[in-house]
Image (cartoon, helix red, strand yellow):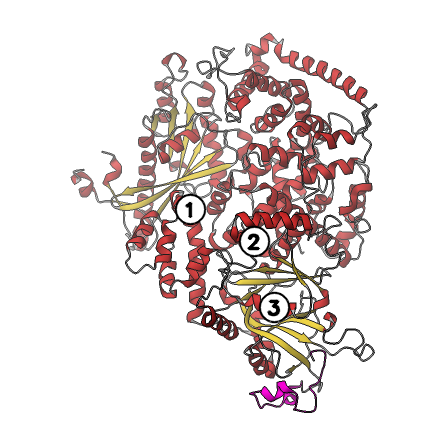
Amino acid sequence: MPEEYTPPASPTASYYDLSDDDEDYSTITHTSTGRGVKLLYTKSKVYVHPTPSAKDNIPGFIALIQQKPPPSENTSSAPAGTVDPAHLLLAWLPESALGSAYDTYVKVDLLDTSLPPKQTYLVPPVPISAGNSSLGSYSFSVPVSQIYSLLVRPPSLGWWWGSIVINSRGGDGFPALFFHDSECASTIAQSKARARENFDPFGENGEMFWGGDEVLRWLKRFVKVERSEVEKTVYLINPSKDDLLSFGQKPVIDSIAAKKNAEAAGSSSNNGVAAVMDPFTKAIKSARWTLLERFARVTQFSRQTASNLLDNPNLPPQVRKLLRNPDVINLQDDFDSARLYLARWAMGIAEQSEKERAQIVWKREDMMEMEDSAVGEFEILDIEAGNLKTDTDRRRPVEMEEWESWFNKSSGRLEITVDEVKERIFHGGCDQAVRKEAWPFLLEVYPWDSTKDERSALMNSRRDEYVRLKGKWWDDVSRREGQGEAGEYWRDQRNRIEKDVHRTDRNIPIFAGEDTPHPDPDSQFSTIGTNVHLEQMKDMLLTYNEYNTTLGYVQGMSDLLAPIYAVFQDDAMAFWAFVGFMERMERNFLRDQTGMRAQLVALDQLVMLMDPVLWKHLEKAESTNFFFFFRMILVWYKREFEWNDVLRLWESMWTNYLSGQFHLFITLAVLERHRAVIMDHLQHFDEVLKYINELSGTIELNSTLIRAEALFYKFQRTVEASDRKHGFPSPGTATPIVKLTHRRSTSSASGSSAAAANKGKAAAVDGPEITEPLRSLLSRDIIRVEKKEPQDVTAEAAGKGKTPMRG
Amino acid sequence: MSSRKKVMLKNKNSDYKLKVIILGDSGVGKTSLMNQYVNKKFSASYKATIGADFLTKEVLVDDRLVTMQIWDTAGQERFQSLGVAFYRGADCCVLVYDVNNQKSFETLDSWRDEFLIQASPRDADSFPFVVIGNKIDVDDGKRQVPQKRAMAFCQSKGNLPYFETSAKEAINVEQAFEDSLDLVIARNALAQEEAEEYTGDFGSSAIVDIGADSERDGCAC
């Protein structure tokens, strides 16, 4: 029945007899073409949210539509009783675009979907579009066969409305579709029906019924819908074996992983169930609306207002319970974050209640002005991150056995490619024991192609060199006594180092002790005591001060040295590894701060390119100096993550596997993670700075790394797309960077020279679309300070002033 | 009783926000002073400040709530070149040195100059500065800057208020910050009075005012 395009001529077919609608189907055939497509299912009040403001939301219909197969295919392509998914379209149309077909959509929405369709409804054909519609309208449709997966988020606290994002095989971006269930006639009817049958609106599993469930149900009638075991919000459509491989790695649906997940789900009952609302949201959802509205007016939420609320006799038990929830109380204790947290929540409710009071009339002009849906964009990113997350094999730490297997047993020379090593460490990090072995390679103490004997000889000479450098200040009595200008400078530096070492990572056991008497009775710490590791740290930093005389010791360096020393606990090795690290970090510490400035400028341009909506918001908040990322960039997130996470993060970034400046993608990932709060609640520079500063200690490393990687790929595609548009090939197009394994080393000249060659061309076309600071983010080279001509750095940075993306 | 109490605020409906910047050499105790004043806590384990951060404290001035935003910055000179971002709109600057560290005292002048260049306040000559000599809890034998010398310096810079504090022992910290609050309120009141001479109107701006002389003299608190 369903594969039939036109209804049978005879009205004796049972379904038509049951029809309670006497409207003739032929009258709803599209008038201009005389042809229509079958509207199988549709749901009303499905919105696109192009901006964070509710007044910009566009109401529309999500629909499953059946097209007539081309005549050549006739009926042979699909077995009887089924529909070729290529002829099924999943579409979204704004209400304003429906015209005379609107009534048909309303009618089909209200049909009882639990029964087979009684009648065929024809609507005007919907053009297949890529979603990135240039018309300014968001309407789109995509053949079901072209859908790779759906990202399905049931309503939750963070996302008041449940949403679905379509991820097509072509990688097209579609905006997220939000199901405004409280306005949707069919969803209201369906949940009422459920309540009648089960006496429980939440259903037997505790999940609240919502509109997105219906869409999955529609699709399941025609295609295989598989929920990813690894990423619970992802549903794969008709997954083939290839689809099950993500980035050529492990299958998404891995039977072992599935089993593990099932076991994990067993222990915490909530995790196993699909599309389920958390009980918190459930409580809020079922609370009376007017009260929530009143609650939402509490913008200056404080402990006092919270307790006032508690005293309110009209408070529904759900909300009362919520306010007594220990987690919520903890948040209140941490006043600032609680205010923000509750403000974020309250404002979400306020916005929705405002919307319920007055339906906003959508104007055509407003629609024309709209850009890509911001929300949709980053939901797509989640899918990518979800795919990346699935390679569990790649993301386990390199252990000693694996590390040793990469080297020749007798010569000790590396037998796999450098990129293979880097790929593993980039994705998986190192086991604690491997760090001592791997870090000297990553930090350029050992050449990758060295033998065991060569490394041992090299290290011997490095040890001698360290002793010699240390002797330069150690044996210089006049300087140590502070004589002359050199002596005064040296003493200042020593005092600086002394102060900083005594306040660096003292919570780490090796740096904690104060049992050794201080060697210098004049030190401000002479009465407190020290320990051997602190003294080693001081000596290494004073030696670096001697090694790099133009830079000397600068605050922040002690933070960079401490993890390296703690891993090696060998001063000479730690010193040279630190020197290697400083090669790339040196520009952070320049007297004129040009290196830091250049990175903040690159970050500014990166955000402008990747997330213009957020960028505009930050500009309004006078925050595009990105100064609040100063600390993160200066000492590479040392103050933001726990000790072990720092080690893991640094070794990833040291590989330069994707970019020599991957740390800026970490910054972007952190920013995107907190995008919603920033957009909704942070209006001024000081608010943004405070919020970002307080993220310290709260950032989850693994998801940040995955997000940063996904953002890098997205950035890479953006640059390539822009290059194609501007008519010159990017050096990377032929070889996607994911398959870099055949390249030999980071010093491959191709990247930078090709980029340089293209520079002139780019300028000649359409203005600096992808600026040099941005293009340099694609390079795996690190940016070093030019030793002989430091003024070059200054000139370069000055030239990289804030240039708008378009001229 | 602090003189602050004699200050009366006009325009009851607006919040008053005040921005204070703490400057001084690395390790003189800027972060400790801020935390002692705002959180009444001292910790020996602060890390060197990187970049900038601030804390806010709400102070009651004649029944009106004044929000002080106190900015703490990195002490190494080179990091100040990016300071414009957070110096802007400052109402007061607190210069801190360590009484046991001669060098940190000698740099006070350049901290002051650097601030005036970067913040470029409207009326640089009368911009409120407060000087703090911190770490007076350390035993006398180690003191390098005599009080007399510090006071002479403050006098030469236009009678800057001077406090000797210990963030560790919570000595004089509150007084120092509240004095900076008084200074700003007094200065803004003056500006307000001048503005009123032209407009004859209090306006709706959130500006505080000192009470009339009679009120000030007659205040019994």
Horizontal relation, residue A89 to residue A536: left or right: right
Q: Which mark is residue A327?
A: 1
> Magenta stretch?
A2-29
Q: Secondary structure at mark 1?
A: helix
Labels 1 and 2 within one chain: yes
Tally of numbered tags: 3
Residue B160 drawn at (x, y percent): 35, 30
- Give amino acid for label 2: Gly
Q: Marks 3 and 1, Cα distance to the nearest angstrom?
A: 36 Å
Q: Majority secondary structure of the magenta segment?
A: loop
**Looking at the picture, does residue A126 appear above or below residue A654?**
below
Asked if residue A259 shows in the view, the reply is yes
**Within-10-Å neighbours for mark 1: few <14, some 14–19, many 20+:** few
Residue A534 coordinates in the image, percent (x, y): 55, 19
Residue type marked 1: Asp
Q: Is residue A104 magenta?
A: no
On the rendered structure, is A677 left or right of A717? left
What residue would you read off at disc 2? A272
Give me the chain letter of mark 1: A
- Secondary structure state at the residue bearing disc 3: helix
Looking at the rendered image, the quarter that the C terminus of chain B falls into is top left
**N-terminal-most mark, 3 or 1:** 3
Q: Residues within 10 Å of mark 2 (few under 14, many from 20)?
A: some
Q: Quadrant of residue B20?
A: top left
User: What is the three-letter code of the residue carrying label 3?
Assistant: Arg
| Residue at image point 54% right, 16% down | A491
- Report x, y in % for residue A312: 29, 57
